[in-house]
Each structure stands twice: as C-alpha cells, then as structure tokens.
Amino acid sequence: MSAGAKLQLDDERVKEALRVVIDPELGYNIVDLGLVYAVLVNDGGVVNIVMTTTTRGCPAANYLKEGARDAAWSVPGVEFVDVILAYEPAWSPQRMSAAAKEHLGISDRDEW
C-alpha cells in the first residue's frame, strides 16, 4: 500500500481499536472477553457498537461504554459512534476468546 493510500474503514479495524478498552475488574480487553456483540460500520463513517457487561448492575458499565466510544472515534474515517448496552443474550465466560480464558485461568471444561 502506498503512503498516500487510504485504509478502508471496516468493522475489523474498529474491533481492533476496541481492544485498548480494558475491563477494570477482569483486566482484559472487551473484545476478547466477548463483551462486544456487534460492530457495524455504515456509510458516512457511522459506527454502531452493541456490547454488554458481565452483569446487569456492573459498576463499570459507563466506563466501558465511554471507552468503546472513544476507542472507535480514534479510527480514521469514523464520523459518529453510537454504543448500545444490551443484555440479551446474557454474557457468559463461554463468549471469551481462548487467549482471554487462558489469561484468567479458565478452562473450557469448567462448568458455568
């Protein structure tokens, strides 16, 4: 890619940016924890993020929501970000990536 080439804005670039948002209780990023349900990149640089928290009453909900918004804004080409907290389906450790499970010492054989 030439120095002047523009990177295309897509959901993977936004998801990568969201990895800088660390859940303060679990100490790992929200993407690999499975807290990000969907990232939609629409025309005009509009990004919609649907995410959750580990529990409905999570005291870090606003922190995580604002962190996701700010991280998405850091991606070149993003013009607007909307973050929605959803609790259906409910989060479970099964949503975590293998790396997050390993970091937290969770085995796929563990009962939830």
Image: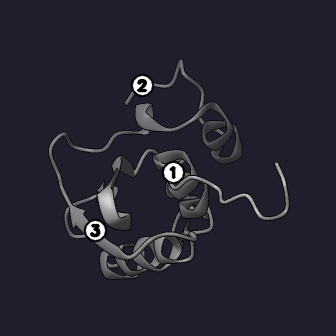
Q: Is residue 48 visible?
A: no
Judged by depth in the image, the label closer to the viewer, 3 or 1, is: 3
* Mark 1, other Cα within 10 Å: few <14 / some 14–19 / many ≥20: many
Return the disc, 2 or 3, that comes first in the chain's sequence.
3
Which quadrant of the rendered structure holds the C terminus? top left
For this orientation, the residue located farthest to the left is 88
Q: Nearer the viewer, residue 41 or 66?
A: 41
Side of 53 relative to 21 (left or right): left
Q: Which amino acid type is shown beneath numbered disc 3?
A: Val
Residue designated by label 1: 31
**For mark 2, does the 10 Å Cα neighbourhood hold few (<14), some (14 to 19), or many (20 or more) residues?**
few
Classify mark 2: helix, strand or loop: loop
Please give left or right for residue 88 compared with residue 28 in the image: left
Mark pair 3, 1: CA separation = 14 Å
- CB under 8 Å between callouts 2 and 3? no
Which amino acid lies under the numbered mark 2 shown in the image of this protein?
Glu
Instruction: Identify the image quadrant of residue 97.
Output: top right
- Residues under labels 2 and 3: Cα distance? 31 Å
Where residue 103 sits: x, y (%)? 70, 46
Q: What kind of residue is marked 1?
A: Val
Q: Can residue 110 be seen in the rendering of this structure?
A: yes
Q: Give the residue drawn at x 39%, y 52%.
A: 35
Q: Residue furthest top?
A: 109
Specify which label sits upstream in the sequence, 1 or 2: 1
Q: Residues within 10 Å of mark 3 (few under 14, many from 20)?
A: some
Which residue bears the numbered disc 3?
83
State if disc 2 and disc 1 touch (CB < 8 Å): no
Q: Is residue 103 above or below residue 47?
A: above
Q: Identify residue for label 2.
A: 111
